[in-house]
Amino acid sequence: MKKLLLSICFIAALLLPRSYAEVKMSPSTQNFLRNYESTTSEQQRTKLKARYAVAQNNNQTIVSAFLHLADKNNLDGLDENGVVINAQYGTILSVRIPADKLETVSQLPSVQYVEIGRPVRTRMNNVRSADFSNADALHAGTGLSQAYTGKDVIVGIIDGGFQYNHINFYDSERQNLRVKRVWNQNTSGTLPDGFYYGREYTTPEEIIAAKQDYAASHATHVAGIAAGAFNGNEYYGIAPDADLVFVSYNMYDNSTSNTSITDGLKYIYDYAESVGKPCVVNMSLGYHIGPHDGSSTFDRICDNLQGSGRLLVGASGNEAEYNMHAKKTLTPDDTTMKSLVEFTPSWYLYGNMTSTVDIWGDADKPLSAKVIVYDIRNKREVYASEAVSTTAGTSEHITDPTGVDGTIDISAATDPYNRKGNITIDINIASLGSSSYYVGFEVTGPEETTINAWTDAYMSWLSNFGNSEFTNGDNQSSMGEIGGTGKRIITVGAYTSCNHIEHKNSSMYNDSYQTVDQLASFSSLGPTADGRMKPDITAPGSMIVSSLNSSTSSNRNGEDFYYVVKQENVNTVNYYFGSMEGTSMATPVVTGILATWLQAKPYLTPEQVREVFAHTAKTDSYTGSIAGTGNNQWGYGKIDAYNGLIYCFGLSGIEETGAPTRPMVYPNPATETVHFLLPNNDSNVTIAIYTLNGTQAVSRYMGDVAAGEQCQLDLHGIPAGIYLVRITGEKTHLTTKLSIK
């Protein structure tokens, strides 16, 4: 009887108008479906991988997606339609669906919304020094009861281009591989428990024999920065004693998507829980499909998975040099936003002009939109499509519109979680009829609606070409949806610690043309669409030297050959180290530092991490006066590993971390408050601050102070300058300098 009723539901659903089905599909899902339906052969359909997360399996096209359920316990109709569930997050499923069943699945009564996955792109010499991250002091245990190197902490890396057996991933004695688990999501073999794709390696022998996921170096470089342990040169990482778990996401194969990343995150956290260790995960990845306000399905899953002893660090992105964002608030006299898509001048190197434009409005405010082709020379519209509406959930598949050789898809829907109107435009064109023709969009909505639009910034951005009727692009809110917008994700921007380095095989890449200590010109900016500060922190990210994959570095045909800085021979095997730059490199600096903090405080939360940043991040003439408040370029400032760890002592208590070996005063420089710790219990303790000529500025009697107890002194009303701090007690007599900003 149940199957009979289900069949009746299917038949009834198929008789409904298409617009009803599309209301239950995200705009990206609608665009994919229109493209899929317009192709006639599997060979043509494989080309969809260039823009959508699809795979081929036994001549069947499979898509990855998030399914939103009306009831987390109601899975009716999924198995019958070939849906494979990889992970469940409450009412959200990470799944794989046969493309032929996509519309049928969307119409199931148990399914509230279908959101197809989208492909994701990639985004040490002096880095550890006191001038930059200040991690060397942790490794040395300066003034501490022990060294902090990430021991008994899991560092997870979700990335692509791993050389699993690189010498950097062994212990410092070069005997034991520290990689405990590998999940290669893009090959077949032994499945990880609870997942239904990819291959898992669980023993050192399996991991060493596998060698690599594919010939690239991004992940090898990132993992080396976070936790490399090879001490035969100066390029080892921040947490060299951490255990490693790798999830291989293939950047060159679009069959994986943001759904694969949430699966990978769960996989790493599950392993860490199984061995009873705290964990920090690194995502040096990015894309720009989503609301950029922390309400995306991806961000909500990531936020829910994080917590005490479970941290997640993401790259802000490398798009600050591109005007890939546009924003306009509609008024009673102007209820339309128009903008045009500009492609990189070398677009032809990529085959076609391809771009995705993702547009979002405000909650409960409907939008309508159409595609236009505009002649900027003669200031006239040569084509306008039919409008799509977020209330009706409609879409248009446009082939060869006037002035364009190619296809354009535009779809609209209302997101069921944030109730915002969303319009997605996928552009795939071979040529334009005139050099003055540009594809664009026109969005209409109620007055006081704020509209934000982003391109994928892969090879396109937004422009008005000097026409005031159109909205020009900007580089604000350019942080990526993967790692850049989540409410609990720690988002990292990049500054320059090195702008010149000698490469082994070429001099063409010796200079980065960045300014040391300045924010890197590429480091993406905030704020989020809901007004939160991003990034949260910055770290060195320009010309960072770390491990490279031997298969891409050993000969001049390899893509990393000219980036090699040093070659090391260990037991007759050559290993390579070279330079890269980007927020992808800054992010693992922070990941490694957080691993050392988790060693001291295994239950550290994302919220506590931000508190540490606010009180201990470095500020200088480049950051400006942002101490304790931060901004959308630098976050709270430049990360300080050592002073951050000292602050963690106060968060976690003496029972977890142990007292320092000497009295400590931090942060230094200080702004509103200064803290101190004592190595031993003491009584009749007083802390006082004096000007350099001996005048007392403030004094406070603290009485009995326990070893490792965090005490603080209010600095309000004390002018900026250099002062002397004196701490006295029955056992303590300390005088040190303090800078107040």
Image (cartoon, grey):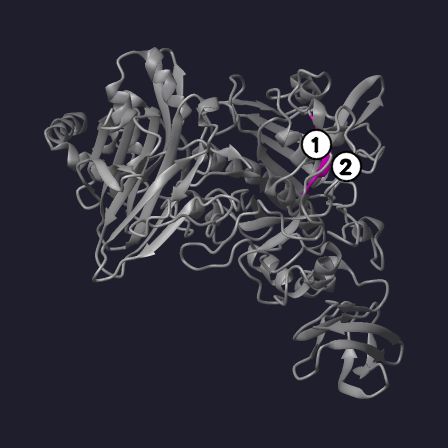
What residue does disc 2 label? 501
- Point out residue 601 in the picture as x, y percentages from the top left corner: 68, 55
In-front residue for pair 502/700: 502
Could you give the CA–CA distance between mark 1 and mark 2, rounded to whole angstroms? 8 Å
Dividing the picture into quadrants, the one containing residue 14 is top left
What residue does disc 1 label? 509
Q: Residue furthest bottom?
A: 695
- Point out residue 318 in the picture as x, y percentages from the top left corner: 55, 42
Mark 2: few/some/many CA within 10 Å (<14, 14-19, 20+): some
Q: Main secondary structure of the magenta part?
A: strand
Query: Above or below — where is 655 with respect to 463?
Result: below
Amino acid type shown at disc 2: Ile
Amino acid type shown at disc 1: Tyr
- Point out residue 227 in the picture as x, y percentages from the top left corner: 71, 39
Query: Above or below — where is 338 with respect to 438?
Result: below
Mark 2: which secondary structure?
Answer: loop
Dividing the picture into quadrants, the one containing residue 232 is top right
Q: Residue furthest front?
A: 378
- Residue 544: say if magenta: yes
Residue at 26% across, 13% down = 40
What range is drawn magenta here? 542-548
For the image shown, how many numbered marks are present on the structure? 2
- Side of 65 where 521 appears, left or right: right
Residue at 83% across, 78% down = 724
Mark 1: which secondary structure?
Answer: loop
Image quadrant containing the N terminus? top left
Residue at 81% across, 83% down = 690
Q: Can residue 288 be seen here?
A: yes
Mark closest to the chain's N terminus, 1 or 2: 2
- Residue 218: say if magenta: no
- Side of 288 where 630 appears, left or right: right
